[in-house]
Amino acid sequence: MTQSNNVRLDFFAKLLGLIAALITLVSAVIGLGKVWQGDMGFVTVVLLVIGAAGAWLGCAYFTFKRTPPLVKDGKGTWQHPRLRPLTLIGLLIIPLLVVCVVTYSLYWLPSQVIFLVANFDGPDPQKYRITETIIARLRQALAPYEDVQVETLGRAITEVEGTTGARAEGEKRKATIVIWGWYGVTTEVVPVSVHFEVLRHREIFPELGATARGEVQTPVLAELESFALQTNLSAEMTYLTLFTVGIARFARADWDGAASRFSDVLSQSTEHVSALDRSVVYYYRALAYSFKGNYKDALSDLDQAIKLAPKYIQAYLFRGMLLYLNGDHDRAIADLDHAVRTSPDHLTYTTRGLYFYFNIDYQHAIADFDQSIKLKPDFADAYYWRGLTYYAKRDYDRAIADFDQSIKLKLAFANAYYWRGLTYYAKRDYDRAITDFDRLIELYPPKGYYGRCLTYYAKRDYDHAIADCREAIDFEHDYTDAYILRGDVYRSKGDFERAISDYDQAIRLRPYSVEAYIGLGSVYYHKDDYERAIDEYNQAIQLKPDLVVAYYHRGNTFYRKHDTDRAIADWNQAIGLDPKFDPAYYTSHGHKLRFFKSLKVQGQQRI
């Protein structure tokens, strides 16, 4: 009977243990899911505590549970020796996970947008219901967005507390925006002050108008009594909050989501909003469209922005660059010239300088960058772009001087380190190039490893080059240029199969990669597979008909096949495209192209 009772007790103990384990597992999964969704409320904390405590106790049980001792005062043996190494790890890992979750909760979900609304301080709040009207309107407008919530502070923020107090309350609640203010009542007017305090994404948030930054407005008393004031305030706050939701999506590079939310802002009202002009919303939606590659709608929005705000210089600059990308050079330079004439500052000159730089008009580009630097001597970007222009002109010493200055002004200027490294590389000063790429690895590892790989390749240190390209690819698995460069290194080492594998991967990632086709052609050329080499060069020429090097290499391949007519035709084409391309004057065996021409003219037997 006693044995039977023990069996039953053991069965129920195991059953209860199983139920407890299931509760622990479900609690942990649900709790982590809520954290991921941005919910750090009381229920979430309880679920996480149950899950973590249960898991830790379970690990402790399996770690320290012993069999009954065989002798008096003995310790017995471990009951679960096979599980013990895993459960020991669990005892260490679970507290670390808890710390990670708590840390994550302090900075949880940057995509979550929280609007914290303080009570509007003023007389008869139950009668006028300014706070309630704003909250109700916000919640109604924001209901479709799962990543947005409206929270109430439950008290007023006074002018004595001001911005500092509002920001402190917002930081406690992880808020994106804090809305606060006050109102008064006189016999004729209602002084009102509204603050729309931006805490997140301030670097990309446009400056709001004075009416959203506390400027005292004085609508007539009748507007408060008729609730027109409450309606207008709630409409303006809704307009601004919807824009903030779009900015949050924009900050996450969710261009579709940002454009959609900016469209919702524009659909709210066709009337002018003093705190944020509609032209600004069109401008930001144009940015979102352009990042998607939708230049047509972006240009349409910029047209609308300029129509609403004819002095909107940023819109002219942006439209000018988009028109350039769209191939409309006349309208592009007209917009940029207009911006420079209307607002001759460092930004307008720099933007027009970029236009000239991309159009290979280096003289005018340098002139504009000079003017930008003259107007703002500490503008690092102007030095950087002027350095790029000098680099394009192969004036490497001036390029380095400008990159030096841009780095001095902006210490963590990753692009400046990259291009200064490339400039040293071009000067064959490989040690200094490697020093710059070493620094770049700290700032932006993929490009730093790529640049150092390129330099080691030039030094014929192939093993270090391959290792660095591997690091670049580990950081960015779709780093096409790194695959091509590593393919070049493998080809130089004579490891043709790995070279082919890297070139193939580059083409899968970027089918229009002519460099990869050239690399494949070179591999097959060295493998004496001339037909496949020609096929690869053909593919490169099809993608880029003016690619000089493709004609040159295909000419070499035809020559190796003893097809000198086609070889001469390709070398002629290379020279026609670039008369300064010296290698095209020689075959791979050092024979001068002109010698072949003379043979052909004289009708002699060709080699």
Image: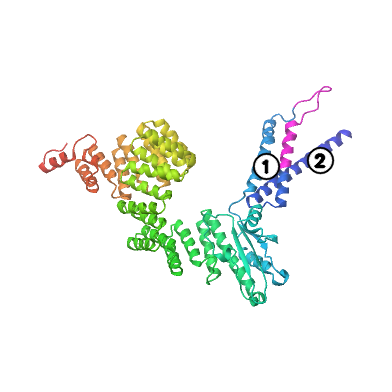
The residue to which callout 2 is attached is 12
Q: Residue at x 43, y 57 (%)?
A: 293
In the image: residue 179, left or right of residue 434: right
Q: Which mark is residue 98?
A: 1
Sequence-wise, the earlier of marks 2 and 1 is: 2
Residue 572: image location, x then y, percent: 21, 45
Q: Amino acid at mark 1?
A: Val
Which contiguous range is marked in magenta?
52-77
| On-image quarter of the N terminus | top right
Task: Please tell me whether residue 103 is drawn above or below residue 121 in the rendered image.
Answer: above
Task: Please tell me whether residue 391 is drawn above or below residue 4 in the rendered image.
Answer: below
Residue furthest to the top:
71
| On-image quarter of the C terminus | top left
Which is nearer the eye, 244 or 98? 244
Which is closer to the viewer, label 2 or label 1? 1
In the image: residue 272, left or right of residue 84: left
Which is nearer the eye, 450 or 479? 450
Residue 495: image location, x then y, percent: 38, 32
Q: Is residue 131 magenta?
A: no
Mark 2: which secondary structure? helix
The image's colouring method is rainbow
